[in-house]
Image (cartoon, rainbow, N blue to C red):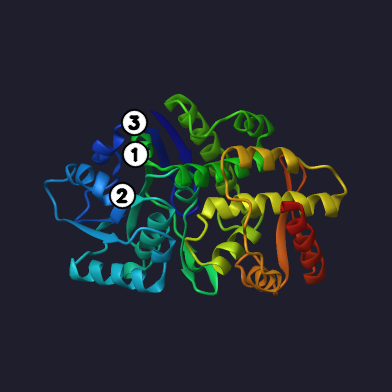
Amino acid sequence: MKDIFVQSNTNSYHITVGESIRFQLEDYLKKDYSSILIVSDENVAALYLDDILKNFSDKPIFQSVVPAGEQSKNMQTFYQLQTDAINYALDRESLIIALGGGVVGDLAGFAAATYMRGIDYIQMPTTILAHDSSVGGKVAINHELGKNLIGNFYPPQAVVYDVETLKSLNEREVRSGYAELIKEALIADTDFYHTLLETDIYNLSNSELQDHLQRGIKIKAHIVEVDEKESGIRKHLNLGHTLGHALESDLGYGKLTHGEAVAIGLLFSLHVSEQVFAVEQPFEELALWLKNNRYPLSDIDYQTDRLINKMKSDKKSVKSKIQMVLLKELAFPVVEELKDDDIEKYLNSFIVRMV
């Protein structure tokens, strides 16, 4: 079992990665909470909700189960969670447990951040992708016009990551999570990047998976400690997300998983980096790894004008100017402001390159 400490200005917390730790939850709670609300989705609840319920026999414990998928990260589901919290009489000494992937973590975290102006919550990630989203305290819901546009910075009290829950993931969820690990390696750790390039993500040992997760989490945790509110280097974590978020929104949430969209966005970032800095990037190398690991890179409906508008309305944009994280070289990210005409040119050449 590994423990990683995150020093936050608003709330410092531990990230614990291990096996079977979902059965020892009381060891990670900082307080004796008055009541507990577990938020999960239909898929995860069927597998692991009973395990969590067994931890608590001496206090009121409730559950809210939402539909699985990105489509649930919306205002209607958020409002339903608030209604559930009110009906269950949660108070300011109550706790919300987010049991699930990134959607549940973002949704339940935002509910916790806003219920009675903020109550405690903990993250219990059950996907590889959520190693990223569960760390750093960014919580949000989507708007039909853009991803994560309604949200807050609100750190959890703890992150309890039982890797046994990852055994139930399908291929799509595995590759979605590994796109974020590749992103973290690209911005901060060249050795980790080369390690991942030698990895068949569908045939991993437990020790390999835990090592990859811990390395990714440490990169994210370090950046969050330096820049909690995304005013500086935390923006580097958005590598691949400018086009990735636009594709998710334009194609319809759920058409591509978040990680699948980010994978395409990573290639686009490398493509643009080559044009802007006139330096060779590992575009072909990464594209081959993605293809070998069965990421959906072809038959994508790129609507250039719509994508540019989506990118301009993204929360990373400033004064309707598109900001992209690019790489001057591996592990050397920078943020560049790009003109619409240049983005259109880069998108068109990227689409040709992807055929």
**Helix, strand, or loop for circle 2?**
helix
Task: Single out the mark in the foreground, 3 or 2.
Answer: 2
Residue 229 falls in image quadrant: bottom right
Lateral position of residue 272 relative to residue 65, left or right? right
The tag earlier along the polypeptide, 3 or 1, is 3
Residue 322 position within the rendered picture, expressed as x and y whole percent measured from the top left:
71, 67
Could you give the CA–CA distance between mark 3 and mark 2, rounded to whole angstroms? 17 Å
Say the numbered circle drawn on residue 44. 2
Say the numbered circle drawn on residue 104. none
Quadrant housing the N terminus: top left
Residue 115 position within the rendered picture, expressed as x and y whole percent measured from the top left:
32, 68
Residue 338 position within the rendered picture, expressed as x and y whole percent measured from the top left:
78, 65
**Helix, strand, or loop for circle 3?**
loop
Lateral position of residue 36 relative to residue 300, left or right? left
How many circles with numbers are drawn on the protein?
Answer: 3
Say the numbered circle drawn on residue 165. 1
The tag earlier along the polypeptide, 1 or 2, is 2
| Mark 3 Cα shell of 10 Å, populated few (<14), some (14-19), many (≥20) | some
| Mark 1 Cα shell of 10 Å, populated few (<14), some (14-19), many (≥20) | many
Task: Single out the mark in the foreground, 3 or 1.
Answer: 1
Say the numbered circle drawn on residue 19. 3
**Helix, strand, or loop for circle 1?**
helix
Q: Are marks 1 and 2 in contact (CB under 8 Å)?
A: yes
Q: Residue farthest to the left? A: 58
Q: Residue at x 50, y 50 (%)?
A: 136
Lateral position of residue 288 relative to residue 66, left or right? right
